[in-house]
Amino acid sequence: MNASQRTKAILVAVDDPVLHPEAMHIAAATGRPIVDSTDPGDINRHLNRVSAVLVDGEIATTITNDRRRDRIFLLASDPGPPDFKLAMDIHAEQALLLPAHTGELLTALGREDGTQTASRRHPGSTIGVLGAAGGVGVSTIAAALARRRTRKNRTVLIDAVASSGGLDLLLGLEDTPGARWPDLGFTRGTVQAEDVLAALPVTGEKLFLLSAARSTALDFFALGAADVTAAVACLAAADEPLDVVVDLRAGDIADEVVPVLDHLVLVVSAEVRAVAAAVSQRLELQRHQVPVSVVLRHRGWSGLDVAEVENIIGAPVIAEVGTISRLPRAVEMHGLIEPLPKALVAVAEAISAELGAGV
């Protein structure tokens, strides 16, 4: 296996003090990076991003392999027997005894990344849109992207801003019946993606919205990072192709959600202070190993050009968008409806191209 095939890590989630050194030794022998953790948060963040997962029985009872990813190996110590029922529950590829099955495990770990069967590939994309500063049109870009993604897949637009003004207003769905954040218990047990889709407000049959409730009564529900990450994980596990677009704001929720995304779009205004803020965000984002693309926002006067922004931030600018003069009034009157302004279509297509599937 060459160096380029060893870029993805192996997650070692083994609590057993006898098994742990065996698992670490085998993982190290592959030459891949190792993520060694029994923390549930770490495991959930890395589960669908690593090359393989080594897990013992104690930790296996706490994970849900909803995406049916391959190369999960349930480990136990000699003489066994292996817990085949638990292996089936977590959709493990094999249940192995160590050290007896060391050779078999090394062979399985030696397979190249990307050789899983089509039925186990993630059938959609999870994309976050985050602003380096306020007032750059993150919600508008997220909504436009979601609308364009429906040309390929069913798409869910998630409002992950605790104090949001309401994506339902932006899409014209404020009066459409359906479940909102307070109605859905993503953190209270297993929820199936199709059940969620059946409950959500929908427009055009393919664009679903998960947003805050709109009521004149005091709402005691407080949106938290656990709600959003659980929702993303649930929807990403859909059996049929489904894209998820998450409207984010810098803060605790974004910090927890970004690691579970397939791609992050950072919207940056072409101004010195905004780009400086984006540099700080970019450095923080690098530790999550999530691909980041930049959309450059021109509002009024721009002090920096594309080359300067790319050089400072260290990420590619994939699209530019200026002020769309008639858009605020149109959104206020009708919401963001089709046909979208050409500038927003161009941004959405540029983002989709980064995902490897234009719309």
Image (tube, helix red, strand yellow):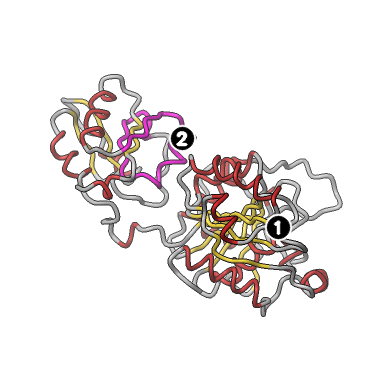
**In front: mark 2 or mark 1?**
1
Q: Which mark is residue 121?
A: none
Label 1 amino acid? Gly
Relative to 216, 168 lies left or right: left
Query: Does 345 lie within the magenta span?
Result: no
Q: Where is residue 136 in the image (x, y as percent from the top left)?
A: 71, 58
Left or right of residue 337, residue 28 in this image? left
Q: Which of 338 and 96 is in front in this view?
A: 338
Q: Residue furthest right?
A: 216
Q: Is residue 38 magenta?
A: yes
In this view, the residue in front, 337 or 65, is 337
> What kind of residue is marked 2?
Asp
Q: What stretch is highlighted in magenta?
A: 33-60
Q: Give the side of residue 109 with respect to residue 131, left or right.
A: left
Q: Which mark identifies residue 42?
A: 2
Q: Position of residue 53 (x, y in %)?
A: 32, 40
For label 1, the residue is: 303
User: In the figure, is residue 108 to the left or right of 168?
Assistant: left
Residue at (38, 31) in percent of width and height:
59
- Residue 22 vertical position relative to residue 219 in the rendered view, above or below: above
Instruction: Please tell me whether residue 5 is drawn above or below residue 356 in the rendered image.
Output: above
